[in-house]
Image: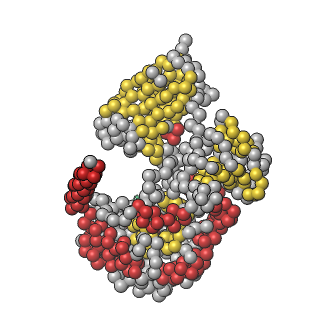
Amino acid sequence: MKTPSLFRLAVILAIVVALFAGRALAADTSAMPAIVSNETSTQRDARMKWWREARFGLFIHWGLYAIPAGTWQGKPVAGIGEWIMNRGKIPVADYAKFAAEFNPVKFDADAWVRLAQGAGMKYIIITSKHHDGFAMFRSAASPFNIYDATPFKRDPLQELADACRKHGMKLGFYYSQAQDWHHRGGAASGGHWDKAAQDGDMDAYLHDIAVPQVKEILTKYGPIAVLWWDTPTDMTRERADLLAPLIKLQPGLITNNRLGGGYEGDTETPENKVPATGYPRDWEACMTMNDTWGFKSYDDNWKSGEKLIRTLIDIASKGGNYLLNVGPTAAGEIPAPSVERLQQVGVWMKRNSESIYATTASPFRRLEWGRATRKSGDAAAGRPGKLYLNVFAWPKDGALIVPMRGTAKKAYLLSAPSVALALTPSPAGLRVTVPAAAPDPISSVVVLEVAGPIDPLPPPPITAGGDGVIALGCDDADLSGKALRVEGNTQLNLTGWNSVESYAQWDVRIERPGTYRIAALYAVPSGQGGSDFNVTVGAVSLATKTEVTGGSFKSVVLGTVRVEETGPTKVTLRPAKISGAELMRLRSLTLQPVATP
Ligand code: H79
C-alpha cells in the first residue's frame, strides 16, 4: 500500500515541478524586468559577505570639475560642484579645455588609501567617469581621458588599484552610464544647453563609449569589488541589457540599483539621507561631508566629526552601509577639513569599531539615548550574542535603561571589558548601572552579552504633553501594508498609502476624557486631493477627505471626536478610497482637547 501511494505522490510532485519550471521559462521570455540569475541565496550571501561586514566606505568624486571648483566666468555656480558644466551651461568645447590644465601632481594614491583605512573604512568607490564625460583613466574608447588629454599623463585608477591591493582595501568604480554631457548622444535629458555638440544617438553612445569603457574598468585594474552606476536617465531594458552582461567580467562584483531598465542590482542607495528605518535588502547611504560631491572651493559647510560618527552609528543601527564622500582638488589633494574629519572618525573607530563591523540592525525601534547594533552568537564556538549600545546621551543618574524584557548574561563598557556592570531587570526595561562619566564624548559603547533572542518592550504609549495636546509623529506609528513607510532625513513623513491595507496606528493613553480636535500635518499634490480616509480614536471614528496642499505640508483640521474612555487606546489613520497616486504624505497627527464651557 505504502509504496504505490508514495510513487503516486512522486509522480504528482514531478508534474507540479515541471509545471512550475514551465512557468518560470515562460516568465523568462516575457517582458518582466527581473534579472535572470541562477545564483542561490547562499551564493549571494557569500558574495555580499565582505560588504555587509564592512559597513563603512569612502566615496571619491574627482574629475575636471575640481578645476572650476564651483566658479565659472568669475561667478559662483549654485548646486553640487560636479554639475557645474550643466548648471553653468558651459559649452562642451569650453569645458573640455579644462583638461589641458589638469595636472594633479599632488595625487598620492597610497596616502588616500591610508587615510581611508585610518578612518576605519573598508572600501573605496571612485568616479571613473562622471556626467561630464571625462574618464579618470586611460581609455581607448575616448581621448577625453586623464591620460591622453592632460599634461598629467598618469592613470590614477591604476595607481589607486595598486595602493588598494597593497593595503587590503576593496576598490569600486562609479560610472555614469546614461548621462554624459560630453559625448554625443550621452547627454540624454540632462544635456540640452549645447545642442550642436551634444545631440546624437543614445544607443550609439552606449555602444561606442559606455560599453567599451565599462569593459575597460572591469578588466584593466585587477579585482574590482563594486560597480556603482548612476542616474539611469532614459535607460530602457534594451539599453541596460547592453551593460548588464559586463557585470560577469568581475567575479563577485556588487552593483547598486542605478543601472536602470528594471535591473535591481544588489543595493539600495539612499542619497544624502538616512532612512528612518532600514530597507528589506542591502543598502548603502551615500553622503557628502559638506554640500557638494565634487570639490567647490567655497563650500565650507562641513558636518562635524561628531555628526559623521553618529551618522555612521545610526546607519549601522538600521543595517546599512555609510559611503562617505570626499572631493579632492585639482591639485590632487583631499581637502584638509575632510582629512581632519576622517582622522576624527578614525580615533573613534579605533576604540569602538567592534560595535560597527559585521553587526546587524538594532532590535529596538527607537532608543531615547542613542542607537544599538547586534551580533549573533555561536553557542558551539562558545561565542555569546552581543548587543552594542551606542550611547549618545549618557545617563546623568548612572542608570541606562534598555527597553527589553529579561536580563543579559553580562554587561561592560567596550573600553573596559573586564569591569562588569550591574544589571537589574525592571518593568521599564533592563537597567545597566554605568559610571557617572561618559567614556566617550561622542558615543560610548556598552556591551550586553545575551544568551537568546532579545525581547524588546513595546514603546510606552504616547500621552498628552504639558499643553494637553497628544502629538503623534510618523516614527511613532506601527505601520501596516506593504508600501507604507517613513521617509525623510530630519523632517520625516509617512508615504506609500497606496491601498486601504496601508494604515498607521499609534498606541496612546488618554488621561482626560473630552472632545478633541484632530489635525493632520500633510501634503497632497494638486490633482490628487479628495481621497476618503478615517481617523479612529478607540471606539469613535471620524471620516473626512484630503485637501490639496499643493505639494507643501499644511496643517489641516479634520474634525472633532468625543472620547469618553480613559486609559490605553489606539489611534488609527486609514484610507477608505484613494483618488490620487496615494492618500497623502503625513508628517504628524495631533489631538487637541477642546475647552468645554
Ligand atoms: O554623483 C553624485 C551626484 O552628482 C549624482 N549622484 C551622486 C552620487 C547625481 N546626479 N543626479 N543626481 C544626483 C540627482 C539630480 C539632481 C538634480 Fe540638480 C536636481 C539635477 C538637476 C536638479 C542638483 C541640483 C544637481 C543640479 C541641481
Residue 481, given in percent of the width and then of the height, sits at 39, 40
Residue 42, given in percent of the width and then of the height, sits at 43, 63
Is 244 rendered above or below residue 448? Answer: below
Foreground residue, 347 or 103? Answer: 347
Is 96 rendered above or below residue 562? Answer: below
Q: Residue at x 50, y 65 (%)?
A: 49
Q: Quadrant of residue 479?
A: top left
Is 581 rendered above or below residue 52? Answer: above
Residue 384, given in percent of the width and then of the height, sits at 63, 55
The residue lying furthest to the front in this view is: 1
Q: Is residue 332 visible?
A: no
Is 58 rendered above or below residue 506? Answer: below
Quarter of the image with the C terminus in it: top right
Left or right of residue 584, residue 408 in this image = right
Q: Residue at x 44, y 41 (%)?
A: 494
Foreground residue, 206 or 221? Answer: 221
Q: Residue at x 55, y 20 (%)?
A: 566
